[in-house]
Image: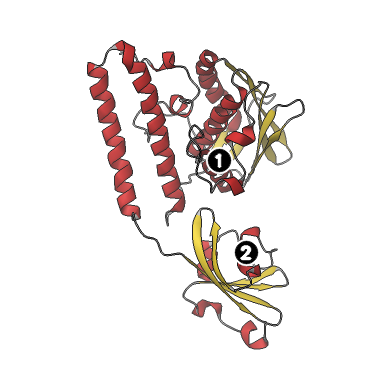
Amino acid sequence: MSDANQTTNLEQFPDSAIEVVHGKVQRLNRIAMHRFPELRSGMELPGFLSTPLKDPDGAGTFTHQGVLYLFSRVAGTAGSLLLVRPAPKSGLTDRQLDGFVRQMRGFLQEVLLEFQSTAGQEHDSAFNRSFFRMYRLLSNLDFMRGMDSSEGTLFRPVTLDLVGLCRRLTEEAAFLLREAGVQLRFQCRLASLLIPGDPALLQKLLLTLISNGAKAAHPGELVLTLERRGNQAVLRLGDRGEGRCLDDLFPPKEAEARIPAPGDGAGMGLAIARHIVELHQGTLLLGERGGGGVLALVSLPTGPLRMDLAVCTPAPEPAGGISPVLMELADVLPLSLFHLDE
């Protein structure tokens, strides 16, 4: 950029201002820091900014983490200045969507209570499974609404035992999955492994991976392993079945924009899993193992640890007492498990 532009005070711009020189982020204003916390001065240009930087028209749109942005680019002799702002929204407001989710939760619970008091046993299992599926869909919608809100996802990291969390969830899930023809096992040589993390979010991450892995493994075996490698906790979830490829259940990012076909689900699981891993500054990889098996690999940092420890005490359930394990596995489990005895 010119000398005049180099001395420009980026704080004077009402939108996000990002100065790029020789393929690196040179400077950015406070609005850009708040909107894109992953950006740092001196870092290599991240992939999501390649479109606005290379667009021949110097103006247009791009999408980052599900949000549509408008951009304009001012080119100089040594670099470019990107001005970015969220695209105008129409339709439902955040307040209206929040009200919709809260009312739907209440209505679903009322319907369940009314149905269980009047329905016969021959119908209630099918209804209960559909109810759990609807509730999971609504919960995922509510989670993604939080992702896109100005406050972001509620993230409360503490020091927790990842071995204990994995063992508890796999024991609960394995008991149910046996009825679906899927054998789930947890393998770990560690007695415990303390990491900084949000217990509720990591539980949702694990159940999402197990649910989708069970679809790939059905019928067959699903194995969750945990080990420590340096300063990383590494989780592997693999199947030994003849089912669908995990990449079909967790499609690549470029496929997320397409409308899901009937039976494919809403396509929110992968976005939620990736977001939870990113909040924990980890990585999520999906692929195939030798011999046709599939694999999900999650790497999470083991430090720095926080002074506040997670304790096993009862906590309010956002699902109103509905089992999160049963809810997440609803697509895999047989009807017989959804007959809720009084």
Q: Report the residue at 50% width, 23% height from top.
A: 332
Which tag is nearer the camera, tag 1 or tag 2?
Answer: 2
Colour scheme = secondary structure
Query: Residue placed farthest to the right in the image?
Result: 290
Residue 296 horizontal/vertical position (percent):
65, 34
Tell me which corner region of the image, top left, top right, bottom left or bottom right, holds residue 292.
top right
Identify which residue, 28 or 339, lies in the foreground.
339
8 and 158: which is toward the camera: 8
Q: Please give left or right for residue 291 compared with residue 91 in the image.
A: right
In the picture, the quarter occupied by the N terminus is: bottom right
Horizontal and vertical percent position of residue 93 = 33, 56
Q: In this view, does 51 lie to the left or right of 98?
A: right
Q: Which amino acid does label 1 sit on?
A: Leu
Instruction: Point out the tag, 1 or 2, that comes first from the N-terminus.
Output: 2
Q: Name the residue under label 2.
A: 51
Q: How crowded is mark 2: few (under 14 residues within 10 Å), some or many (20 or more)?
A: some
Q: Which residue bears the numbered disc 1?
A: 270
Q: Residue at the spot x=43%, y=28% of the render?
A: 327
x, y (%) of residue 320? 34, 31
Q: Which residue is at the far bottom? A: 4
**Residue 322 visible at all:** no
Asked whether the viewer can see residue 18, the reply is yes
Q: How packed is label 1: few (under 14 Cα within 10 Å), some, or many (20 or more)?
A: many
Circle 1/circle 2 CB separation < 8 Å: no
Choose between 263 and 178: the one closer to the eye: 263
Q: 236 left or right of 158?
A: right
Element carrying mark 1: helix
Mark pair 1, 2: CA separation: 23 Å
